[in-house]
């Protein structure tokens, strides 16, 4: 009986470790933080999800810091992925900063 009392605290600690590991991945999502920008649409300090599609005009740029890896990337406009406007034959109008 004495041996079973020692197992219970070990199992309890193991269950706590497993529960903690299940919580960590949900909070460890990658994010983008704007660290440099010349457009008011993306102000410095703004935090965005890592799947953000940037819409930048001609001459616009942003530099993002990817968290938690701390990698930086500069994105220059016009960014791809803009939706065409009616009457433009598939070309989006040039935006400016």
Image (tube, rainbow, N blue to C red):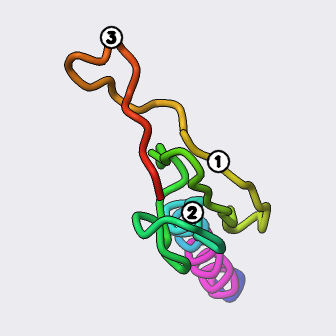
Identify the mark nearer the N-term, 3 or 2: 2
Crowdedness near tag 3: few (<14), some (14–19) or many (≥20) residues, C-alpha within 10 Å: few
Where in the figure is residue 77, as x and y percent of width and height?
Answer: 58, 44
Please tell me whether mark 1 sits on a helix, a strand or a loop: strand
Mark 1 or mark 3: which is in front? 3
In the displayed structure, does residue 45 sit left or right of residue 10? left
Q: Quadrant of residue 32?
A: bottom right
In the displayed structure, does residue 37 sit left or right of residue 96? right
In space, the residues marked 3 and 2 are separated at their CA atoms by: 35 Å
Disc marking residue 31: 2
Is 12 included in the stretch rendered in magenta?
A: yes
Provide the residue designation for mark 3.
Answer: 89
Q: Which residues are magenta?
A: 4-18
Relative to 5, does residue 52 appear above or below in the rendering? Answer: above
Please tell me whether mark 3 sits on a helix, a strand or a loop: loop
Q: Main secondary structure of the magenta part?
A: helix
In space, the residues marked 2 and 1 are separated at their CA atoms by: 19 Å
Where in the figure is residue 6, as x and y percent of width and height?
Answer: 69, 86
In the displayed structure, does residue 95 sit left or right of residue 83? right
State the count of labels. 3
- Farthest-out residue, left: 86
Crowdedness near tag 1: few (<14), some (14–19) or many (≥20) residues, C-alpha within 10 Å: some
Residue at image location 68% in from the left, 80% down from the top: 10
Q: In the rendered image, which quarter contains the N terminus?
A: bottom right
Is 31 included in the stretch rendered in magenta?
A: no
Tag 3 and tag 2, C-beta contact below 8 Å: no
Relative to 15, does residue 5 appear above or below in the rendering? Answer: below
Provide the residue designation for mark 1.
Answer: 76
In front here: 86 or 12?
Answer: 86
Crowdedness near tag 2: few (<14), some (14–19) or many (≥20) residues, C-alpha within 10 Å: some
């Amino acid at each position: 009986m004495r041996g079973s009392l020692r197992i219970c605290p070990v199992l309890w600690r193991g269950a706590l470790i497993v529960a903690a590991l299940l919580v960590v991945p949900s909070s460890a999502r990658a994010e983008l933080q704007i660290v440099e920008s010349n457009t008011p649409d993306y102000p410095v300090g703004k935090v965005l999800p890592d799947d953000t599609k940037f819409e930048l005009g001609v001459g616009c740029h942003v530099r993002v810091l990817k968290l938690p890896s701390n990698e930086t990337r500069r994105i220059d406009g016009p960014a791809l992925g803009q939706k065409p406007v009616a009457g433009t034959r598939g070309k989006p109008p040039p935006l400016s900063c």
